[in-house]
Image (cartoon, rainbow, N blue to C red):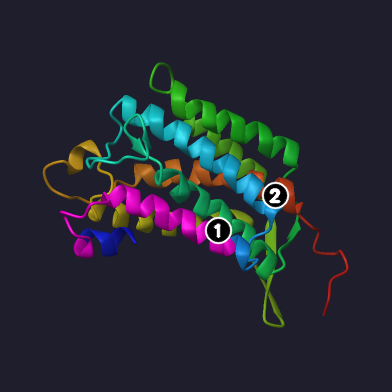
């Protein structure tokens, strides 16, 4: 929808592009519940990430990290309300593939430790503007927690596996691709993109990796990681 509205949405439409995206995203969410692609329990957790993302967006736009250049009726400060759905869709994706591929784990990090790491990550996204940036320590903590973990997933009838950390990095890569698509479509812009579009720097890859851990932790609190040795349907 971001790319399609960049090229096909009428510039003189009575409904602003951002507001159309908000209503479209809201419709998609309702349909996903109606057709049971998501459970109410999952939606509650996804909503938390939605709110977390929106609060961070309000702060980040206020300090000039990025900007939404177009007008919107549905907005808070300089942030159109559809932006929260972009965060929520990450949690939605994780919750859905967790069920579809019947995730199992070995040596999964303790949820309490992931919770503490997620809080530290989120707080640092605000505090690093005023004090030391703790991202190097957060990356190290994530590597330690996830370094020994393996994820096992079933596609059709065949089980496959990979290091959990690798899986998180691969998901982050596609989020980074999506962010490039989003800025290319002009939905939001970083300062260096104001005059001419350039690719989003790899530094944002690290930021999204950390935010993905927050989303992953919230979904894990609902789905509760199952050990690979636990009984499962054949």
Whole-percent x and y of residue 110? 75, 42
The residue stretch that appears in magenta: 7-32
Disc number for residue 158:
none
Whole-percent x and y of residue 4? 28, 64
Above or below — where is 62 with respect to 207? above
Q: Is residue 110 visible?
A: yes
Q: Secondary structure at mark 2?
A: helix
Residues marked 1 and 2 touching at CB (< 8 Å): no
Q: Secondary structure at mark 1?
A: helix
Residue name at image x 71 percent, y 51 percent: 41
Above or below — where is 58 with respect to 93? above
Q: Is residue 214 visible?
A: no
Residue name at image x 66 percent, y 62 percent: 98
Q: Quadrant of the N terminus?
A: bottom left
Label 1 Cα crowd, 10 Å radius (few <14 / some 14-19 / many 20+):
few
Label 2 Cα crowd, 10 Å radius (few <14 / some 14-19 / many 20+):
some
Question: Which image quadrant for residue 101?
Answer: bottom right
Q: Is 33 placed left or right of 103 in the picture?
A: left
As drawn, the residue found furthest toward the right would be: 231
Q: Nearer the viewer, mark 1 or mark 2?
A: 1
Question: Which image quadrant for residue 166?
Answer: bottom right
Say how many tags the image has: 2
Whole-percent x and y of residue 178? 37, 57
As drawn, the residue found furthest toward the front would be: 14
* Prevailing SS of the magenta stretch: helix
Q: Which residue is under mark 2?
A: 220
Disc number for residue 30:
1
Nearer-the-camera pick, 153 or 139? 153
């Amino acid at each position: 929808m971001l790319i399609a509205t960049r090229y096909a949405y009428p510039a003189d439409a009575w409904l602003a592009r951002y507001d159309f995206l908000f209503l479209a995203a809201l419709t998609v969410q309702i349909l996903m519940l109606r057709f049971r692609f998501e459970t109410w329990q999952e939606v509650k957790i996804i909503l938390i990430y939605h709110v977390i993302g929106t609060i961070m967006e309000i702060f980040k736009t206020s300090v000039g990290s990025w900007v939404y250049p177009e007008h919107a009726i549905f907005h808070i400060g300089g942030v159109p309300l559809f932006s929260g759905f972009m965060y929520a869709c990450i949690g939605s994706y994780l919750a859905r593939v967790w069920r579809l591929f019947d995730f199992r784990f070995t040596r999964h990090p303790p949820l309490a430790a992931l919770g503490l790491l997620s809080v530290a990550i989120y707080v640092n996204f605000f505090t690093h503007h005023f004090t030391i940036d703790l991202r190097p320590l957060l990356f190290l903590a994530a590597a330690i927690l996830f370094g020994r973990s393996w994820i096992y997933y079933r596609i059709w009838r065949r089980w496959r596996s990979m290091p959990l950390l690798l899986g998180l990095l691969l998901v982050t890569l596609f989020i980074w691709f999506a962010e490039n698509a989003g800025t290319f479509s002009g939905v939001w812009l970083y300062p260096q993109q104001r005059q001419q579009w350039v690719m989003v720097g790899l530094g944002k890859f690290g930021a999204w990796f950390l935010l993905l851990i927050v989303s992953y932790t919230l979904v894990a609190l609902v789905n509760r990681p199952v050990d690979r040795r636990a009984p499962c349907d054949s």
